[in-house]
Every structure is written in C-alpha cells, then in structure tokens.
Amino acid sequence: MDKKARDLKNDKLLLVSEAFSKEIQEKAPEALRRMPCFFIAAPSLRKIVNKEPAQFTFQESQFIDFMIMQSKYDQNIVRA
C-alpha cells in the first residue's frame, strides 16, 4: 500500500473511530465509556503476533501496546 492510500485509510479510520467513540459516550453504560476502542482485523493481528508481514493494518499495534500495559498494571508491574 502506498503512502497516499495508507494516509487516506488512516484518515477514514480516525473519522470512524471518533464517531464510534462519540456514540459510546452518549449511549453506553459507564463501564464501556472508560474502555478504549480499537479497530483491528483478526488476520492482521495474528500475522503481527506471529511476526509475519501483514498486508494491511488498522490499529493492531495500538491494541497490542494497550494489552501489554494493561497486563502490567493488572500485575502491579507498572504503577499509574
């Protein structure tokens, strides 16, 4: 995927993400409002985890980073 297509995809993803977050804030229960939302593709996530090249990605890297940090917080390895 070339840079222009990647930038366009990221821009669209940001718009969808912002709209989805706004709807969650307006309509979801409190517990869901505090949880971040990531747009990921399972095949891409699997390839990233297996250290294989992914054809396309969305927010898989951010999701993995969040899961690592959340795990560290839950295990009291990192303090807020």
Image: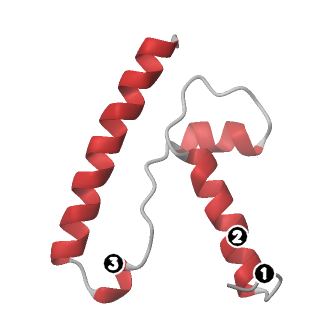
Q: CA distance from mark 2 to mark 3?
A: 19 Å
For residue 9, which quarter of the picture?
Answer: top left
Q: CA distance from mark 3 to mark 1?
A: 23 Å
Q: Which residue bears the numbered disc 3?
A: 33
Q: Which residue bears the numbered disc 1?
A: 78
The residue at the far right in this view is 77
The label on residue 21 is none
For marks 3 and 1 on the same chain, the one whose residue lies earlier in the sequence: 3
Q: Residue at x 33, y 78 (%)?
A: 33
Q: Is residue 26 left or right of residue 66?
A: left
Q: Which residue bears the numbered disc 2?
A: 69
Q: Residue at x 46, y 55 (%)?
A: 38
Q: CA distance from mark 2 to mark 1?
A: 8 Å
For marks 2 and 3 on the same chain, the one whose residue lies earlier in the sequence: 3
For residue 14, which quarter of the picture?
Answer: top left
Q: Secondary structure at mark 2?
A: helix
